[in-house]
Image (cartoon, coloured by chain):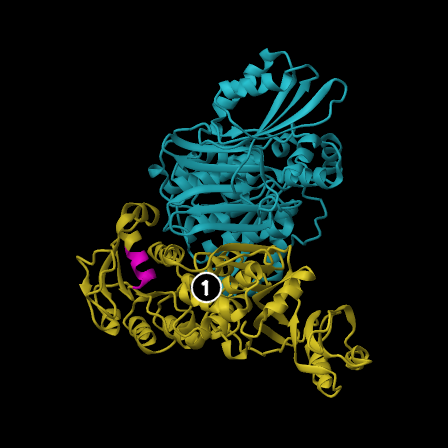
Chain colours: A yellow, B cyan
Amino acid sequence: MSEPLRLGIAGLGTVGVGVLKILRREAAMLTARTGREITVSAVSARNRGKDRGVSLDGYVWEDDPVALAARDDIDIFVELMGGSDGPAKAATEAALKSGKDVVTANKAMLAVHGQALAELAEGNGRVIRYEAAVAGGIPVVKALTEGLAGNRITRVMGVMNGTCNYILTRMQSSGLPYDEVFQEASDLGYLEADPNLDVGGIDAGHKLALLASIAFGTRVAFDAMELEGIGRVTIDDIKAAADMGFRIKLLGVSQMTGRGLEQRMAPCLVPAASPIGQLEGGTNMVVLEGDAVGQIVLRGAGAGEGPTASAVLGDICDIARNFRLPVFGQPAGTLTDVQPASSTTPAPYYVRLALQDKPGALAKVATVLGEAGVSIHRMRQYDHKGGRAPVLIVTHKTQRSALDLAIAGMAGTGVVEGDPVALRIESV
Amino acid sequence: MSEPLRLGIAGLGTVGVGVLKILRREAAMLTARTGREITVSAVSARNRGKDRGVSLDGYVWEDDPVALAARDDIDIFVELMGGSDGPAKAATEAALKSGKDVVTANKAMLAVHGQALAELAEGNGRVIRYEAAVAGGIPVVKALTEGLAGNRITRVMGVMNGTCNYILTRMQSSGLPYDEVFQEASDLGYLEADPNLDVGGIDAGHKLALLASIAFGTRVAFDAMELEGIGRVTIDDIKAAADMGFRIKLLGVSQMTGRGLEQRMAPCLVPAASPIGQLEGGTNMVVLEGDAVGQIVLRGAGAGEGPTASAVLGDICDIARNFRLPVFGQPAGTLTDVQPASSTTPAPYYVRLALQDKPGALAKVATVLGEAGVSIHRMRQYDHKGGRAPVLIVTHKTQRSALDLAIAGMAGTGVVEGDPVALRIESV
């Protein structure tokens, strides 16, 4: 048997404690599966005295995660603190520079600093593994980097923020407005300390950026992503979409086109009967499409102690088995710069607007759409209320730019109140 | 860069040709991802002269796959011939004995000879990879052996024979009887040369046996599986199940219980609205449940040139990256003997029987069920036709043994015609 594999774990929140529990409970199983004993040398967290429900006896305590990362008695630095910068990044860099492999659940750090960290890791002959950073317990990074390594990936899609999916499905089932359901989610502890990371689509966008880099061999380009949160999705949109056989989901889509890389994370409509349309609550779903394999769909819990710890353990076991590969599946130096393509792939759109009660109002809107080259597939006008009638339009496939032109033109008609809402309808 | 990785490929049917095409077309991509050039030294197939639509120039031809497997100029023997014994097994053994790794799509060979082959491989310091043997393009072997390595697996389920799923969903959608749809599938070329491998559940059973071995650390025990094909599923069952909100699927289920390992591959009822219930046509779905990760669902194409070649390439890339692990995820010598447990986990059952038109007939059947301790959840009696009335019963959870007792007792009532059909209702 090989030497024990020694861990240093920084961050003892839900996930860190989950990892420790499995390491203590399943030591024999993990050794049988990897051929090595897996031990913990040292741990670090903000509050030493806190009762975490798991014994820390036998582990050296370090107040400073950077000091932990550089210790001589660890082989893997397990980073479970979070945050794109600050201690997480400093400790990760210290670990790599001192010859440690890194396992992390930190999507923000890798989405922002992934290229630099990958170069640092490879320069030091080390690996960074981050299965837990994307879609919780679903082994999607592994599927993409390894299982589908023989494919040219054509498209990656995913519902990867359980909190947003909870809010949207809860609005659907309860008929409650966004603000109330947001408050519920907050009371239930589902939201990040900065809720905009969730509802602003940033957390899910970070995950999509990582998958896109692996899928297309490009440098992580979170900044180039079209990003829109769910804050503008109203209960009226949810109901109107349902009326027409759709669900609204915060869906990420990335695909390589002739014009460059499309990456968008935005609320969109999907068929209610599709697997993504039926995804309820906090569950995540990732769809991978490759030229050989066709479509692979992966579903599972996207967060929580057990699922995230499972992903961390999978990475630790891989390193114990000496499975080593570049951070994004190919050497960092061979990743290409992204040519960001705004979403120029035509798609049908859902448009909701409030029409004034004036003769010829609908005709004016239809004319503006027609002049922009946007053709109408389905339209519904509902009863007027307080002098305004809600109008729902589903367009035929169109360029987003054409639709934006039409929407801009609606302001000039004098018959449309407020800003129309436009959501892409994705084929999934 | 390391030395090239040299392949010998035996079997140039659909999958073998698919693998060759990808190797030729994507050589640069594969090298970028694995750090090694992947080359083909030699090939073997039954018919040298056949036009396969891909050039064999530059590859040595071997008539004998055993000779191919033992060649000095190959590192991996890629076995795509099929068959549990004969040339596939002989060549695989020759490859391992002469120090080659093996990549295979051969579920039958591993389900029958897996333990001996695993021991041979490990004794020679070699690996056998077989992602393509289970559920086509879905990277489920990888998910189970690697991604979920930190979990105690609690249950594995799967719809893993596309032909059976095609037949069952086609019966559902067309209303045609089994024999006609079987003939359709045969005309479409969907069936194995020996159709019983498909419709007898054997092919799917082989796959389940492999997953169970990995999941539970047990020696492959295909012989200990409860196996039932779809040949007895009538269009009446399909319609009756649909009436009650179910679909009939050839579903494999394996779980470790206090009494031993349950493994069954049999037609059963699942809720129509569940992900497995909605699985149409040739698509495969595998459900993995672990103590930490909860439930992971994987869906994708279970057969065909592209998906199967994708799985073969994934394995080749893993070996190129020097990812090496025991055949069933832990050393063959540590796999435990299976204590086979017949399906003693209680479940609700669907029962269909034909009742004679006699006074008190239904009461007699109900009495027999009650005396066996089987309680009725729902029952429907349909109109009499030709002196017989179809009766459908959904039981509460019961032991299969109690139900079998009741069914045996029905023969003595003198009011039941023919053999009742009983299908388990799985919670999925």
Q: Secondary structure at mark 1?
A: loop
From what the image shows, is residue A193 above or below residue B15?
Answer: below
Q: Residue at x 50, y 76 (%)?
A: A222
Residue A291 rendering spot, x and y as whole percentages: 63, 59
Q: How many marks?
A: 1
From what the image shows, is residue A46 above or below residue A369?
Answer: above
Residue B188 rendering spot, x and y as whole percentages: 74, 40
Q: Can see residue A123?
A: yes
From what the image shows, is residue B23 above or below residue A372?
Answer: above
On screen, residue A180 versus residue B305, left or right, reads: left
* Disc 1 target residue: A134
The overriding secondary structure of the stretch rendered in magenta is helix
- A15 in magenta: yes
Q: Can see residue B74?
A: no
- Magenta stretch in the rendered image: A13-20
On screen, residue A418 versus residue A325, left or right, reads: right
Residue A61 rendering spot, x and y as whole percentages: 19, 66
Nearest the camera: B410 or B93? B410
On screen, residue B76 versus residue A383, left or right, reads: left
Q: Residue at x 74, y 87 (%)?
A: A414
Q: Chain of mark 1?
A: A
Nearest the camera: A11 or A390? A390
